[in-house]
Every structure is written in C-alpha cells, then in structure tokens.
Amino acid sequence: MNDLIYILLPVHNRRVITQRFIECLQQQSYSNYHLVLIDDGSTDETEQMVHELVDSLTVIRGTGNWWWAGCLQQGFNFLKKKGISHDSNILIINDDVTFGKEFLAKGISILEENMQTLLLAQFQEEDASPPKETGFHIDLKKFSFSKASSPEEINCLSTRGLFLKWRDFVDIGGFHPTILPHYWSDYEFTIRAHKIGYRCFTSSDVTLSPNLQETGRSDLNYSNYLQLLKSLFSIKTIANPIYQITFICLVCPAKWLPKNLFKILFSTLLINIRYPIGKLKKLFTRFTIKRNIKKYKDGYKIIIGAGKTHYPGWISTEYPALDISDPNSMGIYFDRKSVKAILSEHVFEHLTLQQAESALTICKEYLLPGGYLRIAVPDGFHPDKTYINYTKPGGFGGGSGDHKVLYNYKSLKTLIEKVGLKAKLLEWYDQEGKFHSVDWQPETGFIKRSSRFDERNKNKKLAYTSLIIDAYNQPGYIQSTRESTTHNGA
C-alpha cells in the first residue's frame, strides 16, 4: 500500500489553524500524499506558510466567494482535468482539525478493504473520550436527523475527514456550489452516494479532533428585524430556508416533498414570530424593573439566562430579551453603575471567548463599586472524564452542543482580570484534580449546580460541580478568603 492520496483542503484566512493542520500532516507515517490547497481568497499569508512546509502541493486560488461546496467543486474539477488514476485515494477535510500520525495510513488501509465505500473519520477529542460523530441517519419522510444506532443505518455523512476512491468520486459526481454553496452540501453529496449503492461508513480506528470553537457557523441576530432577516438568509446560517428547501428538493422523494416544504416554511415563520415575542419580553422586563425600582434602591440584582429560575429579590432575565454580550442590551433596562449583583449560572460556556470578554466588560460598566458578577460554568479541570465528555463543546450532555468553551479556573480567572475585574474563586478543581471551595452564601447568588446543592452529589460525592468565581468591580474585591478542606477528585 503506497498509492498517492490527494488531500482536498479548503482554507480561508485561518493561518494559525491551517498551520496546526499542516503540522499534523508532516507527522504522518504515510507520506505519499499530494495536498490540494483550495485557498478561497486568504489575505493572511496562508498560502506562503503552506508553501514553506509542504513540498507536494497544488494551490487553487479563489476570490472569497466559493464557500465549502465551491471549493470542493474546484478541487474536483482540478483532479478531473489532471486525469489522475481511478485507483487514487481522495481525502476531503477541514483545516480546523488535528489527528494522529497514523491517520492517513489507517484511512487508506480501511478504504482498500472496502469497495464502493465513503469512510468518515470519527470525531474524538482525546484517546479516552467516546467518538462524537459515528454517522447519521436521515428520515426523509420526516426531515429529521438522528445518530445512527448501527453501521447499517448510516445514510448520511459530513465531509470533515471523508476518504473515498477517485473512481467513486467521479461516479457520484461533484457538488452544487451555486444552489447549495455551504451548509447541507456535504449531506446532499453523501445521501446521493448512498442512494446509488455506496456504503457510508465510519471507523473508530480513524479519528480526528475538531476545533469546535472555530466553526464558521453564524447564529441568528435578533438585535433588530432587519438584522434577523439578514442573518436568517446568510450563507453561513444553517437555518437558511432557501438552502433547506434546495436540499429537500434534491434528496427527498416527491411524495414527501409537500410535507417537508411545509415544515421548513413553518419553522421559518416561528423564527420570524420570535422577534416580536422577544420585543414584548423586553418591554415586560423593562416594565417590571421600573415598577419595582424602589425595591432595588441599593442596586439591582439580576439573573442572566434565568430560564424559569426565580429567586426573591432578584430580577430574572433571558436571552434574547437581554443579551449580556450586546453593549446596547443592558442599557435598555439599567443605568450604568446601578447593578449590585449579576448571577450567571452556566451561561458563559455558551459564548465565544470574544463574546465572553465583551460580556465581562459590559458587566463591569453596569456594576456598582463593590458589585460583583457570580459566574458558574463547567469545570475543565474536573478529574472525571465522563463529566468532561458530558460538558465539553460538542459533548453528549444536554446543551453541550452549543457550548463554545470549557474553562478551568486559570483560563476564566485570566479572562476576568483582563477586563479589570477582580476574581475570587469559590469552587474549583486544580490541575491536580483536587477540589477546593471557600465559604459563600447562597443568598448572595444561588448556584444549583454546585457541590452543596446539586442533587447528583447526594449519592456520589462531588459527582457534579461547577467552576464558580465572583468577579468584583475592583473596589469591592475581597483579598482574603478562608478555604475549606481540600478533597480528592470525584
């Protein structure tokens, strides 16, 4: 086994991330590869960096409007024009992944043993963690996706680490960059392959680690209705109804089309209805605050991302009525230097690092001197690997699919102090797996997911804890705290 493998790698202005990918490529035990770098308009010297590190290289240059499907189609066209051998191996892959030195060797070996197969690398962040993506099953009747319960059920794959033979690539055909430029294009490609008899397959022997914080996906912007429509119909938004409809028309049998098209249109309608509902929530929240202003003469106490949580003396708020990372959002309800305490339980892990820094800066502007922000997030130094896999970005726990960052006490403390707030640790694991806590009163900000109050800790000590930190507006920072007995990890 020493056949050449062509690697199709779309990139755009992520030089540092791309360099990490190239470093993984340089460490491969299987070195007979040719990298096809599809550089869609990078201006950060990505191409020059790759030229310096890779000898067997072809660069295809774009202007920034190819997107994912367009880049892959350009790579497909290049290989077709080059007239490569039908037995050649192909790897389609993102640059925001890392992998071990046997990645190419194992992928090619499995591909050689399985004819008419599309092999997807499984997502795995560390050797001991369970794989994240092991193939999907799409129910075209209901337009619903689920994790395949057996290899036979897989009829849909992504293209983030997809191995296939060139003869199979030609038989399946290319992509549809004009009508399906980005999201849904990989699913359409693999569903099309499955329909004409190709096997969609994953293997735990071929794994990669995705950098979920670097995904290009955009969230819907509810700041105003024009921004909502702009974000909804953006190429970078997976909920874009135009591309959902295009996808359905390409993959769905005619008898189920009307039902699925109605489902997409109804979902789009609900997204639009959410905007006026959010506006009404803002008005109601503002009315509630103003009506009870006398209760908060010593400063407001507010809960961020409260959901259904309500505590006496605290004002419950919820996104998008109050977006803690939006500089204009807090000003709708509060004056600067009018807030005594802010409570944020398991909110900051849903923000990117940039959003989190913005949120901390905003909180500082609205906190009274001596006021504080109490933050609770999953603890990245928790010694239980099941806990880590449950709470990490893309983990198997509820809500972790939207997690952007897994903090530890060092990284969160650094971020807090970066904006000029003073950090006081309340509960945390250190890097040695030892648990620490200091005395804190629930009346000053109740954290349910804590060592004392989480019900999961009744049967197993420290089964579930949070990293809890108070971020004080500088004059109120308490320098000395009494630390409790240190416990071994859960």
Image (cartoon, rainbow, N blue to C red):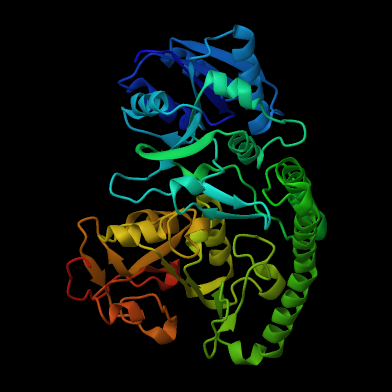
Residue 300 image offset from top left, x and y in percent:
58, 81
Where is 209 relative to 335, above or below?
above
Where is 139 relative to 114, above or below?
below
Residue 100 image offset from top left, x and y in percent:
33, 32
User: Which part of the image, by quadrant, shows the N terminus?
Assistant: top left
Task: Say which of 474 and 277 sits in front.
Answer: 277
Task: Say which of 327 and 47 sits in front.
Answer: 47
Occupied quadrant, residue 29: top left
Q: Residue, x 55% and y 40% (percent of image)?
A: 158
Q: On the rendered structure, is 475 left or right of 479? A: right
Q: Residue, x 37% and y 45% (percent of image)?
A: 125
Residue 257 image offset from top left, x and y in percent:
78, 51
Occupied quadrant, residue 326: bottom right
Q: Residue, x 56% and y 76% (percent of image)?
A: 306
Occupied quadrant, residue 386: bottom left
User: Which part of the image, by quadrant, shows the C terminus?
Assistant: bottom left
Q: On the rendered structure, is 472 left or right of 175? A: left
Where is 279 relative to 233, above or below?
below
Residue 308 showing in the rendered view: yes
